[in-house]
Amino acid sequence: MLELELVKEHCRLEPDFSADDNLVNVFIGAARKHVEMYTRRTLYASASDPGYEDGEDHLLLDDDVRTAMLLCIGHWYANREAAVVGASASKLPLAVDALLQPYRIYGL
């Protein structure tokens, strides 16, 4: 969905640093799931992806969604533990909600 190179650039990782590639790929999958759960839509990379035309609640990976995913991944990469001793707790950046809110389906 997101290219590993783009995520590594966002997290300020050297392109040839591969020790955290598996972790970053897990975060990419988790960010996709977060977008889908928050918006209550199915995320597709392009309109030509299988199932896009059939789904009523499809969502394309545009710049807003891509940015929200990058913000989530950057936050998770920098804060890998559920609790940080000696620091104030923080949740996902507010910008993630602001970027995804226009795409969210509200209701039951």
Image: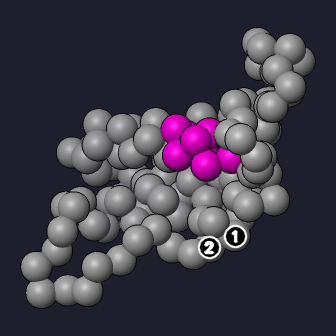
Amino acid type, label 1: Ala
Amino acid type, label 2: Ala
Q: How many discs mark residues in the rendered view?
A: 2
**Numbered label attached to residue 107:** none
Residue at figure coordinates x 76%, y 12% from the top left? 50
Circle 1 sits on which residue? 98
> Which secondary structure lies at badge 2?
helix
Q: Position of residue 87 (x, y in %)?
A: 20, 86
Assess disc 2: are there few (<14), some (14-19) or many (≥20) residues with their C-alpha within 10 Å of its C-alpha: few
Residue at figure coordinates x 32%, y 60% from the top left? 77
Name of the residue lying farthest toward the front: 108
> For this rendering, which residue is in front, 106 or 7?
106
Residue 46 in which image quadrant: top right
Tell me where the magenta segment starts and ends, as one range.
Answer: 32-39
Name of the residue lying farthest toward the left: 85
Circle 2 sits on which residue? 95
Residue at figure coordinates x 44%, y 56% from the top left? 73
Q: Position of residue 32 (x, y in %)?
A: 55, 40
Pick the quarter of the image with the C terminus.
Answer: top right
- Contact between marks 2 and 1 (CB within 8 A): the answer is yes
Vertical comparison of 54 with 86: above or below: above
Q: Is residue 81 left or right of residue 22?
A: left
Question: Is residue 81 found inside the magenta-colored segment of the image?
Answer: no
Residue at figure coordinates x 89%, y 18% from the top left? 53
Vertical comparison of 78 with 8: above or below: below
Pick the quarter of the image with the N terminus.
Answer: top right
Predominant SS of the magenta segment: helix
Q: Position of residue 69 (x, y in %)?
A: 56, 53
